């Protein structure tokens, strides 16, 4: 089977299922695993590189207000790789090529591919999608095995923090303007032994004001700007030092959102393990695969000293 992936999380899932050799093309954002970097790229963003987060937000709003797409799909390249299956998503209009556009293009391809949209809203649905993809590619047993392995890791986190006090946590999916993390993120926090006090589980991430965030009295703030890596997230946080300090949280962390928070694939489990360490460091070690920055001294201690 020849598979085209139009979502980074789908690409990661395919490789985790051992289907890497059947992946014939990916998106411009697919950077994991390293093998994906060698595959043809099917998409590009209309948002130019080098913009700061506020400029990105402004341009996204302008483009979507005009009813224009944020991503362009190379139909000629897609036809050239002749996929039997296309994996895409309809969950987030600013994260990938429009689902309707994908369906329209797929209908014109000589290979007449099937199209599967992966749109999980919770951690359990992310794991279910692994089985769904495996079933669609004839390797259902691998999907069940991978889900069982990932669920075992989640169970280890749950057991480690079961008797611990649950701190109040805000997860920030964007800072300019601030967005409280939704979808699977509150469930990740709950599994890791925390209590989300801004974002809503299995609902869209939502814009909030800094005053609203301060009013919920968070003890921990986790900065996870969508699509950014740990050092990028840390710089974004330091650019909003005053707003973050005003939240009153004792601890502020910048995490590797692109790897294990914003992409609903198997690496979300490492994100849960990292949250477990950040919230209960005496109970869980930090996963070696993820980067993060503890900004508490740079923001909280520096301002309060």
Image (tube, rainbow, N blue to C red):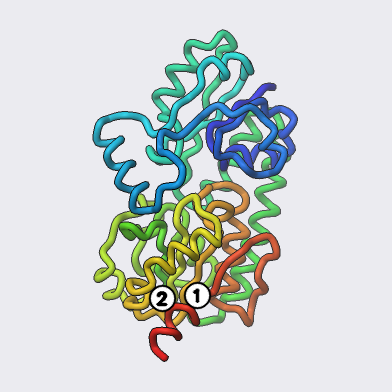
| Foreground pick, 60 / 90 | 60
Q: Is 142 displayed left or right of 171 in the figure? A: right
| Residue 13 picture quarter | top right
Q: Residues within 10 Å of mark 1 (few under 14, many from 20)?
A: many
Residue 103: x and y, percent? 45, 21
| Foreground pick, 245 / 15 | 245
Question: Farthest residue in the top direction?
Answer: 110
For the C terminus, which image quadrant? Answer: bottom left
| Foreground pick, 285 / 304 | 304
Position of 133 relative to 215 (above/below): above
Q: Which mark is residue 126?
A: none
Residue 179: x and y, percent? 34, 58
Residue 91 visible, this orientation: no
Residue 252 visible, this orientation: yes
Q: What element carries label 2?
A: strand
Position of 173 relative to 111 (above/below): below
> Residue at position x 68%, y 52% from top?
148
Residue hosting label 1 = 295
> Residue at position x 67%, y 73% from top?
285
Mark nearest the camera among 2 and 1 is: 1
> Residue at position x 33%, y 57% from top?
176
Residue 240: x and y, percent? 37, 67
Q: Is 31 displayed left or right of 261 in the figure? A: right
Residue hosting label 2 = 168
């Amino acid at each position: 089977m020849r598979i085209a992936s139009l979502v980074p999380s789908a690409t990661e899932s395919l490789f985790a299922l051992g289907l890497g050799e059947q992946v014939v093309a990916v998106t411009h954002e697919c950077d994991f695993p390293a093998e994906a970097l060698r595959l043809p790229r099917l998409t590009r963003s209309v948002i130019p590189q080098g913009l700061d987060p506020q400029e990105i937000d402004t341009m996204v709003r302008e483009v979507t207000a005009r009813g224009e797409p944020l991503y362009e799909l190379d139909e000629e390249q897609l036809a050239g790789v002749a996929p039997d299956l296309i994996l895409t998503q309809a969950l987030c209009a600013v994260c990938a090529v429009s689902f309707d556009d994908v369906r329209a293009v797929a209908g014109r391809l000589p290979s007449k591919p099937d199209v599967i949209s992966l749109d999980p809203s919770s951690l359990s649905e992310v794991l279910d999608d692994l089985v769904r993809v495996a079933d669609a590619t004839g390797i259902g047993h691998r999907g069940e095995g991978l889900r069982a392995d990932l669920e075992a890791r989640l169970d280890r986190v749950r057991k480690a923090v079961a008797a611990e006090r649950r701190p109040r946590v805000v997860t920030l999916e964007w800072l300019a303007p601030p967005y409280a993390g939704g979808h699977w993120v509150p469930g990740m926090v709950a599994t890791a032994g925390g209590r989300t006090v801004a974002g809503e589980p299995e609902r869209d991430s939502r814009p909030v004001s800094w005053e609203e965030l301060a009013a919920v009295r968070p003890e921990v703030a986790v900065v996870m700007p969508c699509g950014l890596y740990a050092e990028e997230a840390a710089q974004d946080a330091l650019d909003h030092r005053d707003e973050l300090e005003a939240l009153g949280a004792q601890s502020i962390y910048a995490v590797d959102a692109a790897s294990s928070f914003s992409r609903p694939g198997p690496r979300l489990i490492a994100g849960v393990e990292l949250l477990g360490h950040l919230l209960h460091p005496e109970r869980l070690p930090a996963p070696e695969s993820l980067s993060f920055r503890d900004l508490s001294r740079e923001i909280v201690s520096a301002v309060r000293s």
